Amino acid sequence: RGGAPPEARGSGGGAAMDAGTAVFVVLLVVAVLALAVYACNLRKQLAQALHDKATKNRLARDPALMAWEQTWEPSLAARAAWKLAFSLVTKSIKQQKYLRFKGEEDEAEVERFMAGIVHDMVDRAIDSCATHGGRLRHAGALGKAFAKRSALRQLKLLAQHRRTLRRQRRNGQLTAAPAHT
Protein backbone atom coordinates (compact mmCIF):
# COMPACT_ATOMS: atom_id res chain seq x y z
CA ARG A 1 0.00 0.00 0.00
CA GLY A 2 2.29 3.13 0.43
CA GLY A 3 2.51 5.76 -2.27
CA ALA A 4 -0.33 8.27 -2.21
CA PRO A 5 -1.76 9.67 1.04
CA PRO A 6 -5.28 8.55 2.06
CA GLU A 7 -6.80 11.87 0.87
CA ALA A 8 -5.53 11.20 -2.66
CA ARG A 9 -6.74 7.58 -2.68
CA GLY A 10 -10.42 8.43 -2.18
CA SER A 11 -12.95 9.04 0.56
CA GLY A 12 -11.53 7.30 3.59
CA GLY A 13 -10.30 4.06 1.98
CA GLY A 14 -13.45 2.19 0.96
CA ALA A 15 -16.22 4.28 2.54
CA ALA A 16 -19.74 3.58 1.30
CA MET A 17 -20.78 5.54 -1.75
CA ASP A 18 -24.07 7.42 -1.92
CA ALA A 19 -27.20 5.84 -3.44
CA GLY A 20 -27.01 7.81 -6.70
CA THR A 21 -23.46 6.67 -7.41
CA ALA A 22 -24.31 3.07 -6.53
CA VAL A 23 -27.28 3.05 -8.89
CA PHE A 24 -25.18 4.57 -11.65
CA VAL A 25 -22.45 1.95 -11.21
CA VAL A 26 -24.98 -0.90 -11.20
CA LEU A 27 -26.70 0.42 -14.30
CA LEU A 28 -23.33 0.76 -16.03
CA VAL A 29 -22.42 -2.84 -15.16
CA VAL A 30 -25.83 -4.04 -16.34
CA ALA A 31 -25.48 -2.17 -19.59
CA VAL A 32 -22.02 -3.61 -20.26
CA LEU A 33 -23.13 -7.16 -19.35
CA ALA A 34 -26.28 -6.94 -21.40
CA LEU A 35 -24.41 -5.57 -24.40
CA ALA A 36 -21.76 -8.28 -24.14
CA VAL A 37 -24.37 -11.04 -23.92
CA TYR A 38 -26.41 -9.59 -26.76
CA ALA A 39 -23.31 -9.14 -28.95
CA CYS A 40 -22.25 -12.76 -28.29
CA ASN A 41 -25.73 -14.02 -29.24
CA LEU A 42 -25.66 -11.93 -32.42
CA ARG A 43 -22.24 -13.28 -33.41
CA LYS A 44 -23.39 -16.89 -32.94
CA GLN A 45 -26.58 -16.33 -34.89
CA LEU A 46 -24.76 -14.50 -37.67
CA ALA A 47 -22.17 -17.28 -37.98
CA GLN A 48 -24.93 -19.88 -38.11
CA ALA A 49 -26.89 -17.86 -40.63
CA LEU A 50 -23.95 -17.37 -42.97
CA HIS A 51 -23.61 -21.15 -43.36
CA ASP A 52 -27.14 -21.44 -44.56
CA LYS A 53 -27.41 -20.35 -48.20
CA ALA A 54 -31.15 -19.76 -48.04
CA THR A 55 -30.70 -17.42 -45.12
CA LYS A 56 -27.96 -15.60 -47.09
CA ASN A 57 -30.35 -15.02 -49.94
CA ARG A 58 -33.11 -13.84 -47.58
CA LEU A 59 -30.72 -11.44 -45.84
CA ALA A 60 -29.55 -10.10 -49.18
CA ARG A 61 -33.16 -9.27 -50.04
CA ASP A 62 -34.18 -7.85 -46.61
CA PRO A 63 -31.54 -7.48 -43.85
CA ALA A 64 -34.15 -6.36 -41.29
CA LEU A 65 -35.66 -9.86 -41.18
CA MET A 66 -32.90 -11.28 -39.02
CA ALA A 67 -33.48 -8.86 -36.13
CA TRP A 68 -37.23 -9.55 -35.97
CA GLU A 69 -37.18 -13.31 -36.36
CA GLN A 70 -35.04 -14.15 -33.33
CA THR A 71 -36.00 -13.45 -29.72
CA TRP A 72 -33.28 -12.42 -27.33
CA GLU A 73 -33.10 -14.17 -23.96
CA PRO A 74 -30.82 -12.36 -21.48
CA SER A 75 -28.43 -14.39 -19.37
CA LEU A 76 -28.99 -15.07 -15.67
CA ALA A 77 -26.28 -12.56 -14.72
CA ALA A 78 -27.97 -9.82 -16.77
CA ARG A 79 -31.35 -10.62 -15.18
CA ALA A 80 -29.84 -10.49 -11.71
CA ALA A 81 -28.12 -7.19 -12.47
CA TRP A 82 -31.38 -5.69 -13.73
CA LYS A 83 -33.24 -6.89 -10.64
CA LEU A 84 -30.55 -5.43 -8.38
CA ALA A 85 -30.64 -2.10 -10.22
CA PHE A 86 -34.44 -2.00 -10.03
CA SER A 87 -34.45 -2.74 -6.30
CA LEU A 88 -31.83 -0.04 -5.62
CA VAL A 89 -33.73 2.54 -7.65
CA THR A 90 -37.08 1.74 -5.98
CA LYS A 91 -35.41 1.85 -2.55
CA SER A 92 -33.92 5.26 -3.37
CA ILE A 93 -37.30 6.57 -4.56
CA LYS A 94 -39.02 5.33 -1.40
CA GLN A 95 -36.35 6.97 0.75
CA GLN A 96 -36.77 10.28 -1.11
CA LYS A 97 -40.55 10.11 -0.62
CA TYR A 98 -40.07 9.43 3.09
CA LEU A 99 -37.65 12.35 3.49
CA ARG A 100 -40.02 14.67 1.59
CA PHE A 101 -42.93 13.55 3.82
CA LYS A 102 -40.78 14.03 6.94
CA GLY A 103 -39.85 17.56 5.81
CA GLU A 104 -43.50 18.47 5.22
CA GLU A 105 -44.38 17.01 8.62
CA ASP A 106 -41.66 19.12 10.27
CA GLU A 107 -42.96 22.27 8.56
CA ALA A 108 -46.49 21.51 9.78
CA GLU A 109 -45.16 20.99 13.33
CA VAL A 110 -43.38 24.37 13.26
CA GLU A 111 -46.59 26.00 11.99
CA ARG A 112 -48.63 24.41 14.80
CA PHE A 113 -46.02 25.54 17.36
CA MET A 114 -46.10 29.14 16.10
CA ALA A 115 -49.93 29.14 16.11
CA GLY A 116 -49.83 27.96 19.73
CA ILE A 117 -47.49 30.79 20.69
CA VAL A 118 -49.77 33.35 19.03
CA HIS A 119 -52.85 31.92 20.78
CA ASP A 120 -51.05 32.02 24.14
CA MET A 121 -50.13 35.68 23.60
CA VAL A 122 -53.74 36.55 22.72
CA ASP A 123 -55.02 34.70 25.80
CA ARG A 124 -52.56 36.56 28.04
CA ALA A 125 -53.60 39.90 26.51
CA ILE A 126 -57.26 39.09 27.17
CA ASP A 127 -56.50 38.03 30.74
CA SER A 128 -54.53 41.22 31.42
CA CYS A 129 -57.41 43.33 30.03
CA ALA A 130 -59.80 41.64 32.44
CA THR A 131 -57.94 43.25 35.35
CA HIS A 132 -58.53 46.71 33.85
CA GLY A 133 -62.28 46.56 34.66
CA GLY A 134 -61.85 48.87 37.66
CA ARG A 135 -60.05 51.39 35.52
CA LEU A 136 -62.81 51.24 32.91
CA ARG A 137 -65.49 51.76 35.59
CA HIS A 138 -63.52 54.70 36.95
CA ALA A 139 -63.19 56.14 33.45
CA GLY A 140 -66.97 55.71 32.96
CA ALA A 141 -67.70 57.53 36.22
CA LEU A 142 -65.38 60.34 35.16
CA GLY A 143 -67.17 60.53 31.82
CA LYS A 144 -70.53 60.86 33.57
CA ALA A 145 -69.16 63.54 35.87
CA PHE A 146 -67.81 65.52 32.92
CA ALA A 147 -71.16 65.14 31.14
CA LYS A 148 -72.97 66.53 34.24
CA ARG A 149 -70.57 69.47 34.43
CA SER A 150 -71.12 70.18 30.74
CA ALA A 151 -74.90 70.01 31.17
CA LEU A 152 -74.77 72.37 34.19
CA ARG A 153 -72.55 74.79 32.25
CA GLN A 154 -75.06 74.80 29.37
CA LEU A 155 -77.97 75.36 31.79
CA LYS A 156 -76.07 78.23 33.40
CA LEU A 157 -75.43 79.82 30.00
CA LEU A 158 -79.09 79.40 28.98
CA ALA A 159 -80.25 80.98 32.28
CA GLN A 160 -77.85 83.88 31.85
CA HIS A 161 -79.03 84.38 28.28
CA ARG A 162 -82.70 84.44 29.47
CA ARG A 163 -81.94 86.97 32.18
CA THR A 164 -80.20 89.15 29.63
CA LEU A 165 -83.24 88.99 27.31
CA ARG A 166 -85.66 89.88 30.17
CA ARG A 167 -83.53 92.84 31.17
CA GLN A 168 -83.35 94.09 27.61
CA ARG A 169 -87.18 93.85 27.22
CA ARG A 170 -87.69 95.76 30.42
CA ASN A 171 -85.35 98.50 29.31
CA GLY A 172 -87.01 98.67 25.91
CA GLN A 173 -84.01 97.50 24.04
CA LEU A 174 -86.07 94.65 22.56
CA THR A 175 -89.19 95.95 20.85
CA ALA A 176 -91.41 94.36 18.26
CA ALA A 177 -91.39 97.45 15.99
CA PRO A 178 -88.37 99.48 15.14
CA ALA A 179 -88.03 102.86 16.85
CA HIS A 180 -89.07 106.10 14.86
CA THR A 181 -86.45 108.55 14.13
Image: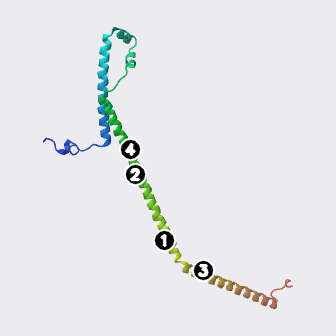
Q: Position of residue 87 (x, y in %)?
A: 35, 38
Question: Which dot, 4 or 3, sits closer to the camera?
Answer: 4
Q: Which mark is residue 124?
A: 1
Q: Nearer the viewer, mark 3 or mark 1?
A: 1
**What amino acid is found at the position of numbered circle 1 in the picture?**
Arg
Look at discs 1 and 2 and give the one toward the viewer.
Answer: 2
- The residue at the point 29 percent across, 15 percent down is 47
Quote the CA–CA distance across marks 1 and 4. 45 Å
Q: How many C-alpha atoms fall within 10 Å of the one at disc 3: few (<14), some, or many (≥20)?
A: few
Residue ID for mark 2: 102
Judging by the rendered image, the residue that carries numbered circle 4 is: 94
Report how far apart the C-alphas of labels 1 and 2 lie in the structure: 33 Å
Element type at mark 3: helix
Q: Amino acid at mark 2?
A: Lys
Label 1 CA crowd tier, 10 Å (few <14, some 14–19, many 20+): few
Q: Which residue in the structure is indicated by mark 3?
A: 140
How many residues crowd mark 4 within 10 Å: few (<14), some (14–19), many (20+)?
few
